[in-house]
Image (tube, rainbow, N blue to C red):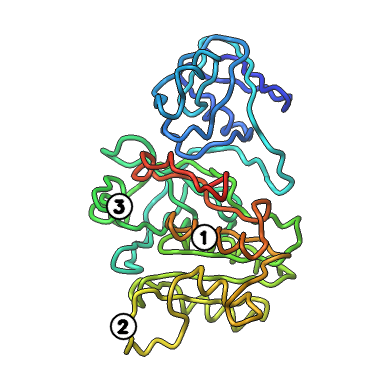
């Protein structure tokens, strides 16, 4: 049985299968709705059902309050239809979005490599090409792990193999399984593409990419995509890590910077002994970001005329946003990766006081 879902203002009609969530039905038909955790915990995918019967599903009472339920609001990642329905959704048009439909794939594990003591690189060969925009992510469906898990795509669009960087999270069922049980030759079920983290090329502005830890995945993909298209503006890549053991792909980026004069690669290490022979930047990424865009020795910086894309631990993102905004770069030109891993979803109710989209 299928139901007709009409999305007001977008003038879109979507077929929804019985027991299929509103969000899943829309994404599989190339209709984008705002979303983040996909577990009913963060409230990003909130919509209002103005007509039709539906079930709320497993929506957290903290993400969807009782009075909101009484008003007919629902979380699209949990709600299922019982009838034809009409919804209102807060959707912004984006000229750079390709609106690619969400699809299921089977993929074979062809390579596993330790990138750092805590991060594994995993390369997959999908059954058919996976379409996505550089910066987007996929969901992996793993054996004996409840619900899908989100991982950023580190390869450029159009490449034969899918590349993932997986940091082992203490107590994390999915990352623990991927680190300890996954073997080459195994087959995995994935769905892609997801998210709206991609370069707004139509803005025609220089780009600042900031990565911390395994958050390097999306910036690595974005950088490869921009270079392949001969992006005509400067590109800055700031890569933060604790020490040299946690800094990976540095030689790859140094080689790219040598080949592309508009690319500026800045690795930053935060936990080094005073006598360590490292000659690169020391400290935190936001500090080096400020120094590199300062005209007065680091007292102030000016980021106007740029776009920034941030991916990494929440504290790093928050401090970088504060630094960028102090340097006159504001929300319309600052983008952060929006998926929320299951391990972090319970804590996702906290928001930056500086930046409503975080």
| Nearer to me, 326 or 75 | 326
> In the structure shown, which secondary structural element does the residue marked by tag 1 occupy?
loop
> Left or right: 343 with respect to 291?
left
> Left or right: 87 with respect to 1?
right
Front label number (1 vs 2): 2
Front label number (2 vs 3): 2
> In the structure shown, which secondary structural element does the residue marked by tag 3 occupy?
helix
Q: Earlier in the sequence, mark 2 or mark 3?
A: 3
Q: Residue at x 64, y 33 (%)?
A: 31
Point out residue 336 in the picture as x, y percentages from the top left corner: 55, 53
Which residue is label 3 attached to?
Answer: 178
User: Relative to 217, is 96 above or below?
Assistant: above
Q: Residue at x 58, y 36 (%)?
A: 34
Give residue 155's mark: 1
Measure the C-alpha gap from mark 1 to mark 2.
34 Å
Point out residue 29 in the picture as x, y percentages from the top left corner: 61, 31
User: Relative to 173, is 124 above or below?
Assistant: below
Q: Residue at x 59, y 77 (%)?
A: 292
| Nearer to me, 43 or 125 | 43
Measure the C-alpha gap from mark 2 to mark 3.
32 Å
Which residue is label 2 attached to?
Answer: 273
| Nearer to me, 320 or 335 | 320
> Left or right: 298 with respect to 6?
left
Give residue 101's mark: none
| Nearer to me, 343 or 153 | 343
The 10 Å Cα crowd at callout 3, few under 14, some 14 to 19, many 20 or more, is some
């Amino acid at each position: 049985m299928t139901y007709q879902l009409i999305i007001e203002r977008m003038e879109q009609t979507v077929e929804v299968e019985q027991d299929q969530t509103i969000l899943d039905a829309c994404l599989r038909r190339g209709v984008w709705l705002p979303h983040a955790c996909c577990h009913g915990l963060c409230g990003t995918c909130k919509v209002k059902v103005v007509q039709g019967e539906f079930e709320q599903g497993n929506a957290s009472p903290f993400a969807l309050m009782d009075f909101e339920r009484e008003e007919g609001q629902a979380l699209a990642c949990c709600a299922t239809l019982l009838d034809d329905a009409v919804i209102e959704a807060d959707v912004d048009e984006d000229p750079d979005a390709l609106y690619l439909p969400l699809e299921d794939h089977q993929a074979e594990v062809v390579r596993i490599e330790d990138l750092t003591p805590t991060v594994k690189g995993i390369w997959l060969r999908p059954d058919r090409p996976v379409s996505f925009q550089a910066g987007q992510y996929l969901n992996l469906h793993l054996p004996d792990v409840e619900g899908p898990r989100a991982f950023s795509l580190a390869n450029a669009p159009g490449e034969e193999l899918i590349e993932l960087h997986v940091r082992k999270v203490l107590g994390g069922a999915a990352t623990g399984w991927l680190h300890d049980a996954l073997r080459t030759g195994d087959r995995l079920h994935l769905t892609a593409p997801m998210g709206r983290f991609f370069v707004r090329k139509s803005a025609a502005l220089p780009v600042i990419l900031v990565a911390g830890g395994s958050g390097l995945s999306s910036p690595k993909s974005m950088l490869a995509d921009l270079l392949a298209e001969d992006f005509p503006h400067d590109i800055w890549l700031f890569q933060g890590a604790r020490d040299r053991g946690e800094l990976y792909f540095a030689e790859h980026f140094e080689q790219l910077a040598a080949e592309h004069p508009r690319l500026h690669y800045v690795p930053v290490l935060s936990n080094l002994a005073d006598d360590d022979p490292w000659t690169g930047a020391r400290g935190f990424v936001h500090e080096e970001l400020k120094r590199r865009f300062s005209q007065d020795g680091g007292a102030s910086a000016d980021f106007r005329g740029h776009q920034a894309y941030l991916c990494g631990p929440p504290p790093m993102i928050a401090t970088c946003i504060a630094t960028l905004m102090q340097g006159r770069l504001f929300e319309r030109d600052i983008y952060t990766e929006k998926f929320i891993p299951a391990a972090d979803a319970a804590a996702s109710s906290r928001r930056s006081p500086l930046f409503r989209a975080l």
